[in-house]
Image (cartoon, grey):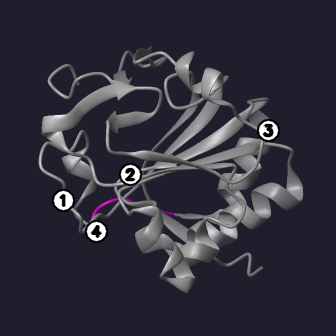
């Protein structure tokens, strides 16, 4: 793995409970060409924004937090397949942390594209499918009912996802508030 790999990042939350089982680091990548109607995070679509972060630095951050795992979301993680593949491989090699990837691509689209398939190779769980506003669900890491779980390992179970809070408000030391989770888009 080339440690020179990087990801274009929108935001990182060091400790979240609304982005997967247990306390975990949540990483929102920047850039998405899917632009699903009603997307929770339209500010992550434009690929020209964001901050370039090294895979090595992100893995080191996650390893030092004492969290259960990492969730990659977006934007669209699989539009940065090389960086995501490098992140997953390095996370697995250096830590015992779990990895969940939330994507708008379907499992069929991922399996048909070698780069996207490499990107999810080290994920424990992929939550796949386009967000559909008319089928909004907002729970268990699925924004809409059509999104499917692709269990890649046995690390997580459905009951783990059912226990994930739908909404979380994080107040930073500087007073900034971050609202995250799968609650109705009108809330955030």
At which x and y percent is residue 23?
66, 24
Checking the image for residue 35, the label placed there is: 1
Decide which of tag 1 and tag 3 comes sooner along the chain. Answer: 1
- Label 3 crowd (10 A; few <14 / some 14-19 / many >=20): few
Checking the image for residue 137, the label placed there is: none
SS at mark 2 in the image = loop
Q: Which residues are magenta?
A: 47-52
Q: Are marks 2 and 3 in contact (CB under 8 Å)?
A: no
In the image, residue 173 sits, relative to residue 149, either above or below, namely above
Q: In the picture provided, is 15 more to the left or to the right than 141? A: right
Decide which of tag 2 and tag 3 comes sooner along the chain. Answer: 3
In the image, residue 164 sits, relative to residue 141, either above or below, namely above
Decide which of tag 4 and tag 2 comes sooner along the chain. Answer: 4
Kindly identify which residue carries mark 3.
Answer: 64
Q: From the viewer's perspective, is the residue at label 1 or at label 3 nearer?
A: 1
SS at mark 3 in the image = helix
Decide which of tag 1 and tag 2 comes sooner along the chain. Answer: 1
């Amino acid at each position: 793995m080339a440690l020179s790999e990087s990801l274009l990042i929108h935001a990182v939350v060091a400790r979240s409970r609304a982005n997967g089982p247990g306390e975990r680091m949540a990483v929102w990548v920047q850039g998405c060409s899917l632009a699903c109607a009603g997307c929770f995070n339209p500010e992550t679509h434009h690929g020209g924004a964001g901050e370039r972060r090294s895979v090595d630095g992100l893995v080191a951050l996650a390893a030092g937090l004492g969290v259960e795992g990492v969730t990659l979301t977006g934007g669209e993680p699989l539009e940065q397949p090389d960086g995501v593949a490098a992140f997953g491989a390095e996370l697995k090699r250096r830590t015992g942390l779990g990895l969940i990837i939330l994507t708008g691509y379907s499992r069929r689209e991922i399996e048909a594209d070698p780069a996207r398939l490499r990107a999810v190779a080290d994920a424990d769980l992929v939550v796949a499918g386009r967000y559909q506003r008319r089928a909004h669900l907002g729970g268990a890491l699925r924004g809409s009912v059509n999104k499917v779980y692709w269990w890649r390992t046995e690390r997580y179970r459905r009951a783990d996802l059912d226990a994930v809070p739908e909404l979380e408000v994080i107040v930073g030391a500087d007073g900034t508030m971050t609202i995250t989770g799968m609650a109705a888009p009108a809330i955030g």
